[in-house]
Amino acid sequence: MKKYILKYGMLAVLSTAALTSCSNDFIETEFFQQVQQGPLNTIEELDAFVKGQYLSMRSASYYGCDFLMIGELRSNNMYSDFANGAGYYQTVASYSMTAGDQYSSGPYAEMYKVIAKANIVINNVPSGQLTWKQSQDPAVIQARANYLKGQAYASRALALFDLLRMFGQEYAGGTTGVVIPTVYNPEAKQARSTVAETRAQIEADFDKALSLMGTPTANIHLTRTEINQYGVKALMSRYYLYKGDYAKVRTLVADLVASGKYSVIGASDFSGSFSKPDSSVNSIFEIAVGSTNDLGTTSTSNKLNLAPKGYGNMKVVPALRLSYVADDVRGAVISSTNVLNGKYVNSFDNIRVVRYEEVLLNGAEAELQAGGNAATALTYYNMIQAKRGKATGALTPAVTLTLNDVYTERQKELVGEGFGYWDLLRRNQPIIQRSSSGVAGTVRNVGNQLLTFPIPRTEINVPGTLVTPNPGFGN
């Protein structure tokens, strides 16, 4: 792994994790530079580094905006109106990226910052007994430390999964994955692992997260701005769906449904739920933003909404907009000019990383695969249909269900949330390049070199680097 990225990650910890609020209740802690160079000896210090991971996820280059928009514009969901929308994402949309592209280097850096901060927590060995202002009980303190380390493992797994999807060669004709740093070492140089090795690390990290976090307490799900045990399982259901391990998805989704902790948001609250911080019943994991951390012109809302709230750069593909029946509340949040103006209407809205509706769709798709139960798939699917009618509260329930029905429902439910491109790739479906007016053009099939992203120049130009570039991209 390149020295620059990990040093950058540590600098982010020093300058932001200890001093900046990642959520409304994260106030400055007693966390000083002299202890940052050695072991973390208090729960407060560990907690600061965990919040620092979420801070990096919140970056406009990552879940704050760009990673999600990249996942939409190379899909059948949305396109970049870069000719009229301030030029955002033109190189991504036109497949003209180079190793110096900000839409490659930005997400790459933030994902590795998450990993750097997670590694500090994961590998921390205190110099003595950990202390915590809230308790003197060593067992309680250790349980809290384990819970924080569990969040770090889950964060590392998520960042590695996102890196693999974006920079791995799985869909681009190769077997090379990404660099997997498991300790914080700013001097280390490390080569890229294979796709299989990257997947093995992701799976091990998710499993370790669950083993450390233990049995969830009764109300743990009410804190949605950190990854809890249910959030780990929800993210795992996403990962294993992309891997094609449908049996694993079925088990995870069944567990989450049986927990009874979450529900599909009602039609009347559908749009508003994206602006309710840490309270919507369908939110499993969201990243705190809030007015003090307003992402402003770098936010997702800025790319989705027209002036005065944004540039309206990202538009819904007309065919998708026209596919909603008249009573579908989700179609009502897309204007006749293809503007998605009912999700993320404010630049300070929390970022929904995992919603219950996605989990149900993961389960429906997995149940329709070999070994699944079609009746269960229909149940999951209709749980969403029952809450999407504008007039009656429910759409007409399905009586039969195909995989294509689920694929279409994923588009309708999750448009604008960053799933479209990765869904097409994992299903081995063609990727259609679109112009700035949404007109379909060049078609690329899985195996095309340009279906991955360039490893940033700042990585491959480091003297003595072991990191190889992805072929097909200029410097």
Image: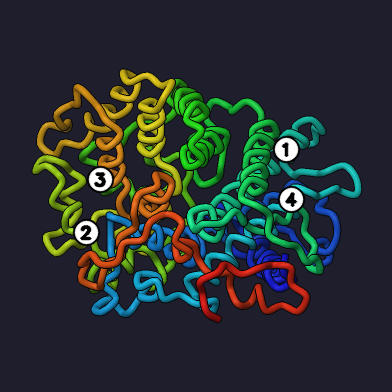
- Answer with the quarter of the image where residue 57 lies: bottom right
Drawn side of residue 44 relative to residue 410, left or right: right
Q: Residues within 10 Å of mark 3 (few under 14, many from 20)?
A: some
Drawn side of residue 435 relative to residue 355, left or right: left
The amino acid type, in three-letter code, at marker 3 is Lys
Q: Residues within 10 Å of mark 2 (few under 14, many from 20)?
A: many
Q: Between disc 2 and disc 4, whose residue precedes? A: 4
Q: For the residues marked 4 and 3, what is the alpha-carbon distance in whole angstroms?
A: 38 Å
| Whether residue 281 can be seen here | no
Q: Between disc 1 and disc 2, whose residue precedes? A: 1
Element type at mark 4: helix
Question: Disc 4 vs disc 3: Cβ atoms closer than 8 Å?
Answer: no
Residue wearing tag 2? 317
Q: Between disc 4 and disc 3, whose residue precedes? A: 4
The amino acid type, in three-letter code, at marker 4 is Val
* In the image, residue 133 above or below residue 266: below
Q: Between disc 1 and disc 4, whose residue precedes? A: 4
Q: Between disc 2 and disc 3, whose residue precedes? A: 2
Drawn side of residue 209 relative to residue 38, left or right: left
Element type at mark 2: loop
Farthest residue in the right direction? Answer: 128
Residue wearing tag 1? 146
Residue wearing tag 3? 412
Question: Which mark identifies residue 381?
Answer: none
Residue wearing tag 4? 121
Q: For the residues marked 3 and 1, what is the alpha-carbon distance in whole angstroms?
A: 39 Å
Q: For the residues marked 2 and 4, what is the alpha-carbon distance in whole angstroms?
A: 43 Å
- Answer with the quarter of the image where residue 260 lies: top left
The amino acid type, in three-letter code, at marker 1 is Asn
